[in-house]
């Protein structure tokens, strides 16, 4: 245990050194992802932000880091798949925004209940311009959930475009759902649905906040 | 003379029978000669869990090809798919191994992407989903809904 901690400290020190020496140096995907996840954990574990009135600040902080981890536009494009090409630039921008909101609703609220689950980095493989970083989360109950991050290089950084949890791909999941909605009704209907959901969510949040005051 | 004719008739009949049998076994055995038609793409899965050569490849439930071979490459399963017809697979297509029904046979499902890049013949589908292991999945979780 101690040996491993020393190893981690050493690796972090080494990374800091390298980063300091070469500001534009793009580290391997794992190191970048680890650094970003550490940032998220720091926010989640911050006792000041844990207080209920600061919940929104906390969420905003997580979302800000999420923007540094994910390439939301790539994920949105891949999820919309065949239906992406016919969209106008304005529609695309709107969709990416709605999609990011959808991910925030579904996941950031779940991340907020984080309570010290262990995250292990198991390995990484780079295949051309795509990387897979394999991680494992050990829950408090002791079950392991394998999570793979699929990443693409964007400038000097690697950004996540798909998350594969327990072999189930996030993009594949949303692609199937979006395709079903678009083919059975229309793209307009999908956007309307996503927008209503987001408005409902914001309304709920507002009510929760006012009831707290 | 009469005798020879009967013999020839029997011979031809036998030959037809053998040919029919050969045809049947080729069809049922799903053997393809001379590489077959269409083109091949490969996919690397972490595990194939019950997928076999000859299993179907589907898009939207429609068969677009078959699994030609499965072999081990770098401790992963390298599956070669033969796609027949002029179905184009986009670069961001996702290949998943699915089960027909709850305990049915395994097949490869391809969910077409939206990329402008098309996978060339002999290319590789890089986005994959391994088959879901239901036993391992107990008490595990599901993605949020739209």
Image: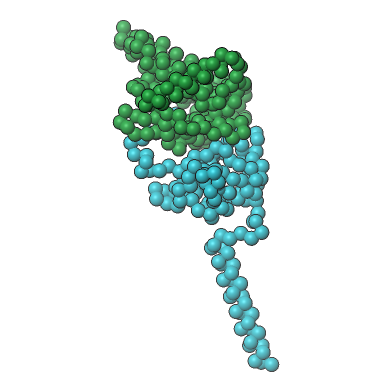
Chain colours: A green, B cyan
Up-down: is B42 above or below A164?
Answer: below
Image quarter in which the C terminus of chain A is found: top left
Front residue of this view, candidates B73 and A40: B73
Say whether residue A209 is visible.
no
The residue depicted at 58 percent of the width and 64 percent of the height is B26
Up-down: is B126 above or below B58?
Answer: above
Residue A59 placement: quadrant: top left
Front residue of this view, candidates A129 and A89: A129
Say whether residue B118 is visible.
yes
The residue depicted at 37 percent of the width and 26 percent of the height is A1
Front residue of this view, candidates A128 and A177: A128
The residue depicted at 57 percent of the width and 53 percent of the height is B68
Percent x, y of residue B87: 63, 45
Percent x, y of residue A80: 55, 31
Q: In the current view of this chain or complex, which residue is farthest to the top?
A: A213
The residue depicted at 66 percent of the width and 59 percent of the height is B34
Residue A47 placement: quadrant: top left
Number of numbered discs overlaid on the protein picture: 0
Percent x, y of residue A55: 37, 13
Percent x, y of residue A83: 58, 32
Q: In the current view of this chain or complex, which residue is farthest to the right?
A: B1
Front residue of this view, candidates A99 and A54: A54
């Amino acid at each position: 245990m101690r040996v491993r901690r020393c190893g981690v400290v050493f690796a972090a020190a080494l990374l800091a050194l390298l980063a300091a020496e070469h500001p534009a140096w793009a580290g391997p995907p794992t190191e970048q992802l680890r650094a970003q996840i550490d940032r998220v954990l720091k926010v989640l574990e911050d006792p000041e932000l844990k207080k209920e009135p600061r919940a929104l600040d906390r969420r905003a902080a997580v979302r800000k880091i999420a923007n540094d981890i994910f390439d939301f536009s790539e994920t949105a494009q891949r999820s919309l798949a065949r239906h992406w090409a016919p969209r106008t630039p304005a529609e695309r921008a709107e969709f990416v925004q709605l999609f990011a909101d959808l991910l925030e609703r579904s996941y950031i609220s779940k991340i907020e209940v984080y309570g010290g689950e262990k995250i292990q980095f198991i390995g990484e493989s780079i295949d051309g311009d795509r990387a897979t970083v394999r991680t494992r989360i050990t829950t408090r109950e002791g079950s392991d959930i394998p999570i793979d991050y699929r990443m693409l290089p964007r400038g000097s950084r690697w950004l996540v475009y798909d998350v594969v949890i327990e072999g189930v791909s996030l993009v594949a999941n949303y692609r199937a759902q979006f395709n079903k909605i678009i083919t059975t009704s229309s793209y307009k209907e999908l956007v309307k649905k996503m927008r209503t959901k987001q408005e409902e969510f914001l309304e709920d949040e507002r009510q929760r906040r006012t009831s707290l005051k | 003379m009469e005798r020879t004719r009967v013999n020839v008739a029997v011979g031809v009949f036998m030959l037809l029978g053998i040919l029919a049998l050969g045809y049947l076994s080729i069809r049922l055995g799903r053997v393809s000669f001379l590489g077959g038609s269409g083109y091949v793409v490969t996919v690397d899965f972490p595990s194939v869990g019950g997928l076999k050569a000859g299993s179907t490849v589907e898009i939207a439930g429609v068969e677009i090809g078959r699994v030609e071979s499965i072999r081990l490459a770098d401790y992963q399963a390298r599956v070669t798919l033969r796609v027949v017809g002029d179905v184009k697979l986009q670069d961001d297509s996702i290949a998943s191994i699915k089960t027909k029904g709850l305990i049915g046979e395994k097949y490869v499902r391809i969910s077409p992407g939206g990329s402008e890049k098309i996978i060339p013949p002999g290319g590789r589908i890089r986005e994959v989903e391994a088959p879901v292991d239901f036993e391992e999945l107990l008490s595990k979780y599901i993605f949020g809904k739209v």
